[in-house]
Amino acid sequence: MDSECDGGGNRYLSGINLETRKDLRKFFPGKKLVQAGICSLRPKSGEQPWIVCPRRLLSLRDGKPHHQATAVAKLIQTSGLPTKSIFRAWSEVKMKVTTENEDEEAKSFDYTFDYVLSGFCRKELAKVALLIEKPEGKTQKIAESNGYTLAQRGGVMWIDDFPSDPITIVEIMTSSTSGGDKKKRTQIAMAFEDAVKNGHYHNGPGINYRQVWARMVSQLIVKSQVGIAWNGKTIWLLQDVLANYISQSTALNLEKYLSEHPREVNILAFGYGDKADSKNHHQQIIELTDSKFYSGPISNAKSKESGFIDIVRIGAPPPKEKLWKSLFFKKSCAILKT
């Protein structure tokens, strides 16, 4: 981001109070608190690093992508947004609403989008006030405080850059870390402290593959469907090692969905390539330029191409003999009688 780490948006508890840490104070002069700025983990020597912070894949907070120009360009290209156009980006867009389906059943929607990109259009302030159910005076103050452009024409107040089509939802899915061990100093904050003081001589937490897969599965289809319902698109940004793990552990083989054009479900996977090789560790910041774009239908009953719904299906069931083996090595917890 070319700026101070903010905890990655979800790791505020890993902040370190320097007022109580004399041994770390000299590394951060003038600071009282510092976030544990860890964006990637290399579990073993020679392996690819795993990205554990969403900011490492993409940060659009100031509109000036530092060391992420390739990621932004690929995102725009794969989303199919018109070229030479201007779009706005919003981060952490929360939506909690209740609507009715075709059967007049009340259904709730409670999700947060990492980013929403949209165009803009001219809209009367009075119509915006009706939309947000606020008085016009209050609506104007909200518009002014959020940086919108207002202009009066013929006695009518307009918002010149109200959000409008096209819509692109951007979701960033990075890996989770295991809880860590205090004795082995593998918790994030501890690993950060030891890396600052000792360089390469430190321990770190492992990667929690199943947790990140479960988080993605619970949102992938829903948020993709929302993008379709809004006549827009949803683009998922992943790291290539996470994409490979999904292909290896589920019935979804992403390599079958390599594409140049967006469809119902869209995944843009970035990787370090050979830039993260231990021989190149002197590089301060490595821009992610290697990418693959996967796109396909959610499901397709009329075709052999079943679609991204396969992500919730098992890749291959293990032989029953493997179960007997697991049970034999473990003492039973109870004997039940019927």
Image (spheres, rainbow, N blue to C red):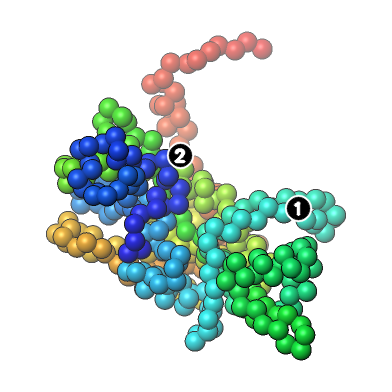
**Looking at the picture, which amino acid does disc 2 mark?**
Pro
C-alpha distance separating marks 1 and 2: 41 Å
- Helix, strand or loop under label 1: strand
Q: Tell me whether the residue at label 1 lies in contact with that at label 2, contact meaning CB atoms closer than 8 angstroms.
A: no
The residue positioned farthest toward the right in the image shown: 104
- Helix, strand or loop under label 2: loop
**Looking at the picture, which amino acid does disc 1 mark?**
Thr
Residue 304 sits in which quadrant? bottom right
Q: Quadrant of the N terminus?
A: bottom left
Q: Nearer the viewer, residue 185 or 326?
A: 185
Crowd class of label 1 (few under 14; some 14 to 19; many from 20; radius 10 Å): few
Residue 184 sits in which quadrant? top left
69 horizontally vs 190: left or right: right
Residue 68 sits in which quadrant? bottom left
Taking the spot 30% from the left edge, 48% from the top edge, the residue there is 31
Q: Residue 165 appears at what percent x and percent y?
A: 64, 76
Q: Residue 204 appears at what percent x and percent y?
A: 28, 40
Q: Work out whether 10 lies above or below 77.
A: above
Q: Quadrant of the C terminus?
A: top right
Taking the spot 74% from the left edge, 71% from the top edge, the residue there is 128
Taking the spot 29% from the left edge, 34% from the top edge, the residue there is 20
Crowd class of label 2 (few under 14; some 14 to 19; many from 20; radius 10 Å): few
Q: Which residue is mark 2?
A: 318
Q: Work out whether 261 lies above or below 26.
A: below
Q: Which residue is mark 1?
A: 98
Taking the spot 18% from the left edge, 58% from the top edge, the residue there is 281
- Does any portion of residue 95 appear in the rendered image? yes
Earlier-in-chain disc, 1 versus 2: 1
Q: Nearer the viewer, mark 1 or mark 2?
A: 1
279 horizontally vs 321: left or right: left
